Image (cartoon, coloured by chain):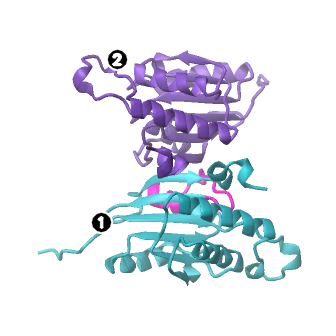
Chain colours: A cyan, B purple
Amino acid sequence: MTKSVAASKIKLYFIRHGIAAEPENYPQDEDRPLTDKGQKKTRQVAQRLRELDLTVDLILTSPLLRAHQTALILQEMGLTPEVKLSTSLAPGGDINNWLSWLTQWRSQGGTHLGLVGHQPDLGHWAEILIWGEMRERLVLKKAGIVGLNLPHSGDPVGNSELFWLTSPKLLLGESGIK
Amino acid sequence: MTKSVAASKIKLYFIRHGIAAEPENYPQDEDRPLTDKGQKKTRQVAQRLRELDLTVDLILTSPLLRAHQTALILQEMGLTPEVKLSTSLAPGGDINNWLSWLTQWRSQGGTHLGLVGHQPDLGHWAEILIWGEMRERLVLKKAGIVGLNLPHSGDPVGNSELFWLTSPKLLLGESGIK
């Protein structure tokens, strides 16, 4: 007899951090903040996501400053009630770490999740979820978005659907980015 | 000595036809027209594409009425100066047929191309260009859009990048679709 596990469909959004300060003035990569333009554009993206009625239960973010700031802007604009830091989302993080966490999280009823992180990791992870392997064929700009449907049950690796991929420019139009 | 071939980067947009009349009243599938809602939503998508400054040199469309009407709306809204019919884009069409045509077309200097067609073909073709095989993992809604960067030269199969995938809803917001 197999144990019955309550399963829910998960919508997973990857959001790449906004434009950050150049490395020259920041000896520690994790200290690089969003630039003024990066903050402004991230705010415009967040505003547009609100117009599209897009909200999530939780945003999990890389602890690096540029990602954390991006997540806080999304929270401030009403896209999520809660932001948590996860070292699994730092550059070079292992998808299996946060997927284990996600399995736990979904068992508690979570259905809409945002992850704020970095390239090339977000692109790799999206490809692994969709096709089971990474090929570096997704163009994910800063403050760009990936939308994935994870299956109701079973392994999401190689079994998830891509329903959205957009740059800020194609989300907002040139007029939105000044 | 290899022959030098002038090559250009190609932006390729797949646009799925808009919402069409149900089959009941149309014994011939190719005669199904866009519904009023399908025309309206396609027009709204076209309007948004104009706001995003998106234009193409040519739209190649499936000859089926619902696709041809979609292409003509895009033309009417100023997205392309020219619409051509291609039986290669009809349901079940072979990607190699229109890829051969595209090779010829790009040699004449074309860089931005729109293809209007059907599911599941458009999704399959996008996956073949990006990953070299189809897995049915892309969600392409009616009047939805796929944006691909084809490489400067060489075989685009398995070597193209995905830079955009959107439904009309995520392009326009709910308020745009009434």
Mark 2 secondary-structure assignment: helix
- Residue to which mark 1 is pinned: A153
Mark 1 secondary-structure assignment: loop
A77 or A21: which is nearer to us? Answer: A77
Give percent across and percent down for residue B167: 48, 46
Residue farthest toward the left in the current orientation of the protein: A1
Q: Is residue B66 left or right of residue A61?
A: left
How far, Cα to Cα, is label 2 from label 1? Answer: 40 Å
Is disc 2 surrounded by few (<14), some (14 to 19) or many (20+) residues within 10 Å? some
Q: Is residue B4 left or right of residue A102?
A: right
B2 or B10: which is nearer to us? Answer: B10
Give percent across and percent down for residue B110: 71, 24
Region of the chain picked out in magenta, as a range: A124-144
| Number of the front mark, 2 or 1 | 2
Residue farthest toward the right in the current orientation of the protein: A24
| Residue A91 visible in image | no
Which quadrant holds the N terminus of chain B? top right
Q: Are marks 2 and 1 on the same chain?
A: no
Main secondary structure found in the magenta portion:
loop
Residue at x 32%, y 28% (from the top left corner): B21
Residue at x 34%, y 17% (from the top left corner): B31
| Residue A86 visible in image | yes
Q: Amino acid at mark 2?
A: Asp
- Residue to which mark 2 is pinned: B31
Q: Which mark is residue B89?
A: none
Q: Is residue A111 left or right of residue A170?
A: left
Is disc 1 surrounded by few (<14), some (14 to 19) or many (20+) residues within 10 Å? some
